[in-house]
Amino acid sequence: MELEDKSKAEQIEEEEAGEGTMSFWDHLEVLRWALFRSACVLAVIMVGTFIAMPHIFDSFILAPTSNNFFIYRWINSIGGGIVKLSQDFDVQIININVASQFMTHISTSISLAAVIAFPYFIWEVWKFIEPALFEDEIKHLRPAFLGGTVMFYIGCAIGYTLVFPFTFRFLVEYDLSPHITNQINLQSYIDNFTMLILVMGIVFEMPLLAWLLSLLGILQKSFLRKYKRHAVVVLLISAAIITPSGDPFTLMLVFVPLYVLYELSILVVRDKKKNEDKDAD
């Protein structure tokens, strides 16, 4: 009778502690609760970002539309006259749909909440896979997940401070004909803003992904070194896709971090033979 009164969650916790073998459906139940908790955390943070959005929208999200953006001013101050950005850069974002401002308020709140909640998402992933790991794997994976979180925020910061502002500025100042007047739609601006920043955050997870694949025996250091030249071409194409502006300066702003991440991936990946030798010792 006591066993019948136990909830499904309590049974799963006992099985996670080693008191039973979890079935496939039990794993799905654990995953379902992890997704539910993540959704709740995202919803709570979204309420906060929704309330704060009117106060940070102009100063943070629309900041790259003005020449007062700190990166623009910093480049002008250190350029020494060689590199100097135009002083009359001031883009007015327009809205042509009735509900666009309200929907943008919601979408940007969700995106910002997702970025803020990213460490919690990583923690839920960690708690889900931890019971299936050995102690030695846990010892190595714990700092890897922490490092992956830090790398995600570094990628987002680079996307916000470098990749998006210069891509946006190049596209706005590109002049196909003097008879064409640029009017930047709010939805177009937000879509590019969110996409470039989140893509850079995800791209910066490359070393963590490479390291995890090496643990599974799928990826080896020798492979990354052997095909480095091919990887450079792939990274250039990827940088061109991420930054559709096409100018060499913006392309290099994306390509250089990608190449550094590739080299970092080579450092963290180990050959299978070396790992087997260490296990044998």
Image: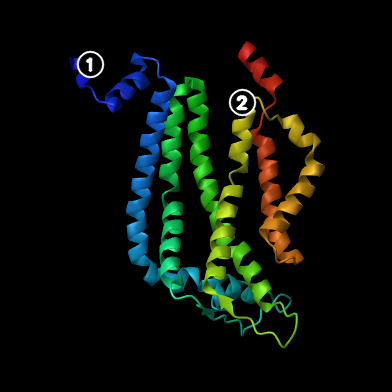
Amino acid at the residue labelled 1: Leu
Q: Nearer the viewer, mark 1 or mark 2?
A: 1
Q: Which residue is mark 1?
A: 3
Percent position of residue 23, x then y: 42, 19
Residue 281 in sight from this viewpoint = no
Residue at 33% from the left image edge and 65% from the top image edge: 51
Residue 239: image quadrant is: bottom right
Q: Is residue 6 above or below residue 151?
A: above
Callout 1: 10 Å neighbours few (<14), some, many (20+)?
Answer: few
Q: Is residue 267 above or below residue 217?
A: below
Residue extending furthest top?
280
Between 227 and 188, the one lying in front of the other is: 188
Residue at 40% from the left image edge and 69% from the top image edge: 102
Q: Which residue is mark 2?
A: 216
Amino acid at the residue labelled 2: Leu
Q: CA distance from mark 1 to mark 2?
A: 38 Å
Answer left or right for 164 relative to 81: left
Answer left or right for 226 relative to 91: right
Q: In the rendered structure, which disc, 1 or 2, sits on the residue that comes first in sequence?
A: 1
Between 250 and 218, the one lying in front of the other is: 218
Between 223 and 12, the one lying in front of the other is: 12
Percent position of residue 265, x then y: 66, 39
Question: What numbered label is drawn on residue 207?
Answer: none
Residue at 62% from the left image edge and 76% from the top image edge: 77
Q: Is residue 151 above or below residue 167?
A: above
Give the SS element for disc 2. Answer: loop
Give the SS element for disc 1. Answer: helix
